[in-house]
Image (spheres, rainbow, N blue to C red):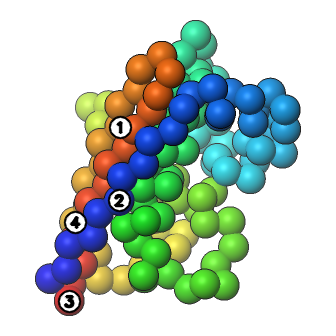
Amino acid sequence: MKIRTGVDIIEVERIKEAIQRQGEKFLNNVYTQEEINYCENTKTMKYQHYAARFAAKEAVFKAISAKISENEDNILKRIEIKNEKSGKPIANLESLKITGIIDMDLSLSHLKDYAVASFTILFEN
């Protein structure tokens, strides 16, 4: 078995500025419609939620980069961050068709100015 991890931190203001400057172009290049709906429904904390999902996508990418082709398009959008019914965040990697995944775990946290994500994945060999 092989364990891979990824961690990312981002300033909420960077994501807020990208969304305000590029609008739907940025959102549609990075987030799935389900992620956009989730973040928009959080009202006053929407930029923190967008930033946390962005950090999560980056953390996941760092952990799985050795398992994906360099020719893959739209990697960030194809890494989907969802929530279980309990509220726990999970990474949906189905569209990347990565094989040999035994287990994975995602943790997100955000404050007014920063969002951070940690992702761990366990692969067969």
Could you tell me how far apart the alpha carbons at marks 3 and 1 are, in whole angstroms?
A: 27 Å
Helix, strand or loop at label 1? It is strand
Residue type beneath disc 4: Asp
Mark 4 element type:
strand
**Residue at the spot 59% in from the left edge and 41% down from the top edge:** 34
Dot 1 corresponds to which residue?
108
Residue 103 got which mark?
4
Mark 3 crowdedness (10 Å alpha carbons): few <14, some 14-19, many ≥20: few
State how many labels appear.
4
CA separation, marks 4 and 2?
14 Å
The tag earlier along the polypeptide, 3 or 4, is 4
Q: Which residue is mark 2?
A: 6
Q: CA distance from mark 2 to mark 3?
A: 18 Å
**What residue would you read off at disc 3?**
125
Q: Secondary structure at mark 3?
A: loop
The image shows residue 22 at horizontal and vertical percentages of 85, 38
Numbered disc in front, either 4 or 2: 2
Q: Viewer-proximal residue, 81 or 94? A: 81
Q: Nearer the viewer, mark 2 or mark 1?
A: 2
Q: CA distance from mark 4 to mark 1?
A: 17 Å
Report the amino acid beneath label 3: Asn
Q: Earlier in the sequence, mark 2 or mark 3?
A: 2
Q: Nearer the viewer, residue 82 or 26?
A: 26
Tell me residue 69's x, y (percent). Answer: 56, 85
